[in-house]
Image (cartoon, grey):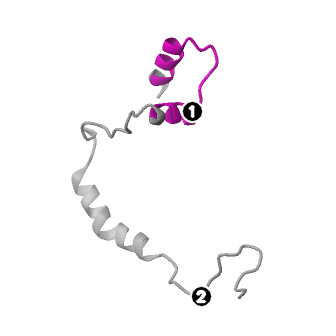
Amino acid sequence: MARVQTVIRRRLRLSLSLSVATVWRLLKRHGWPWQAPARRALERDEHAVELWKKEVWPRVKGSRRSPGRGSSSRTRPDSR
């Protein structure tokens, strides 16, 4: 992101510092898509990833609260 900030500052001749949010807003406004890395990290351990998906993810995914009666009001919960 720092390289993108530098390019924008140079091309637009800006002397101020740009926040990450501002850079993303500028890129989005001009139609530049968000892009994922072209390749996976060399350090990625496929076995560890699969193990995590099988053992940890079901517990994390299943730990959500059950849908119950609630309210969309923050100031008057359970009001009708």
Across and down, in percent, residue 16 comes to 64, 18
Task: Identify the image quadrant of residue 80.
Answer: bottom right
- Residue type pointed to by label 1: Thr
Q: Looking at the picture, tell me which residue is in the foreground, 58 or 78.
A: 78
Label 2 sits on what residue type? Arg
Q: In this view, does 45 lie to the left or right of 71?
A: left
Above or below residue 74? Residue 49 is: above
Q: Which of 46 and 69 is in front in this view?
A: 69
Q: State the CA–CA distance, disc 2 to disc 1.
A: 40 Å
Tell me if mark 1 has few (under 14), some (14-19) or many (20+) residues whose alpha carbon lies within 10 angstroms of its own. few
Q: Which residue is drawn at 22% across and 56% down?
A: 47
Tell which of 30 and 47 is nearer to you. Answer: 30
Q: Position of residue 7 (x, y in %)?
A: 46, 17
The image position of residue 65, as x and y in percent, is 52, 79
| Mark before the other along the chain sequence, 2 or 1 | 1
Helix, strand or loop status at disc 2: loop
Q: Note whether 26 is above or below 34 in the view shown.
A: above
Q: In terms of depth relative to the viewer, which is nearer, 21 or 43? A: 21
User: Circle 1 sits in a helix, a strand or a loop, which is it?
Assistant: helix
Horizontal side of 46 relative to 64 (left or right) equals: left
Question: Which residue is under mark 2?
Answer: 69
Q: Which quadrant of the figure has residue 38?
A: top left
- Residue 62, disc: none
Q: Which residue is drawn at 27% across and 63% down?
A: 51
Rate crowding at label 2 as few (under 14), some (14 to 19) or many (20 or more) other CA atoms within 10 Å. Answer: few
Which quarter of the picture shows residue 41?
Answer: top left
Q: Mark 1 points at which residue?
A: 22
Q: State the extent of the magenta-drawn residues as a range.
A: 4-27
